[in-house]
Amino acid sequence: MVRQRNDNRHVTRRGHLRAKLIALGLWLAVWTLAAATAGAAVRIKDIADFEGIRDNMLVGYGLVVGLNGTGDTLINAPFTRQSLEAMLERLGVNTRGTLPLVENVAAVMVTATLPPFARQGTRIDVSVSSLGDAESLLGGTLLVTPLVGADGEVYVVSQGQVSVAGFTAQGAAGSSITKGVPTAGRVSNGGIIEREIGYELVDMDRVSVSLRNPDLTTAIRVSQAINAMLNEPASRATDPATIVVAIPEQYRDNIVGLLTDIEQLRVQPDQIARVVIDEVSGTIVIGENVRISTVAIAQGNLTIRITETPQVSQPGAFAPDSATTETVQRSAIEIDEQTDRKLFVLPEGVSLQELVDGLNALGVGPRDIISILQTIKAAGALQAELEVL
């Protein structure tokens, strides 16, 4: 009787263990499928912007004071002298014609980015860049500088201590070392917003989604994803870069919630077949959809090496007294042409991996790959857009 109970306990434990393993296997399968789905799609937030929600560029002209003899030379930078005189006159100091040649002032351009929906009184960072021949802005202070937008209106007023990452050190013998860019800096929280840009979401009856990389297929997929979420045909793609969404009734008083739900949707963006080449750095980027038609490739190298070897030529035994010992250059020319390169055939419709494997099989480097790709494109066998930077 006791033995039967023990057997039942073993059976029960095995059943529980089997159920746990099955549950674990199902969980792993679901997690793998979700990870694969998430990896194949991206959020609309990462590939598109909402029309009207954008930054605005600001610019201004100002003076940085307090430099340790590293400012503009007033003789070489007359605009710095004029700005300094005008500023002192506004403060009640008349220096016309008597301004000394100070070296602790520098004229600078001040730039900032006004974020969307920035409210009056909030602070933003501003960037400062030297305009004259100043050597460094280290230790300087930016005086009150208004920053204007494209419409000429003042939106931000900036002032504060300039933070510079670079520096310059010079010795008495004239040797110097420079790290970074000492003539550009940043004023953290140095700009105060004085004017707001009027844009209200509550007054909108429709919103436009703008793709950062315009594409017809991607625009249709975004529109379909939005309609599937709303369960109604509220959105439509008007062009490869714009998807117009009519505000549904359930989101009439919650447009921010609608934008939040839209930007969290995941879609699979499409892209054209493209090969981008940077000849300066030798960088090659090949898109996933690049295909090659049937083509044969042969690549060979011709190396010409010229070696100059100095030799001493001495006068002979019966040479005249005016003869002297001379050093002459002897040139040796070697030509090395690699003839072991074979003709390599790429079949039609090869993928990106097959293309890379084929080029690597030839033993060519990035520079040679650039020439090969350009030649394939000229032959009409590269079914992709070739862009050379």
Image (cartoon, helix red, strand yellow):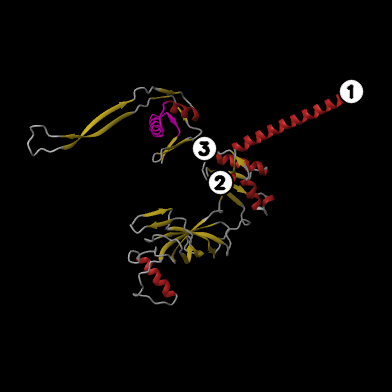
Q: Is residue 46 above or below residue 100?
A: above
Q: Which residue is mark 2?
A: 48
* CB-based contact (under 8 Å), mark 2 and mark 1: no
Which residue is pictured at 56% across the width and 46% down the height? 48
Which residues, given as a range, are shown in magenta?
362-384
Q: Secondary structure at mark 3?
A: loop
For the residues carrying marks 2 and 1, which lies nearer the camera in this image? 1
Which residue is pictured at 56% across the width and 51% down the height? 51
Q: Nearer the viewer, residue 312 or 31?
A: 312
Q: Which residue is mark 3?
A: 271
**Circle nearer the N terminus (2, 3):** 2
In the figure, residue 316 lies in which quadrant?
top left
Q: Secondary structure at mark 1?
A: helix
Amino acid type of the residue tagged 1 in the rendering = Arg
Residue 354 in the image, given as x and y percentages of width and height = 48, 27
Horizontal side of residue 159 vs 267, given as left or right: left
- Please tell me how crowded label 3 is: few (under 14), some (14-19), or many (20+) other residues with Cα within 10 Å: some
Residue 218 in the image, given as x and y percentages of width and height = 55, 40
CA gap, disc 2 to disc 3?
14 Å
Which residue is pictured at 41% across the width and 57% down the height? 168
Q: Nearer the viewer, residue 48 or 328?
A: 328
Horizontal side of residue 159 vs 201, given as left or right: left
Reply yes or no: does residue 196 show up in magenta.
no
Q: Which residue is mark 1?
A: 3
**Please, which residue is most extreme toward the front here?**
317
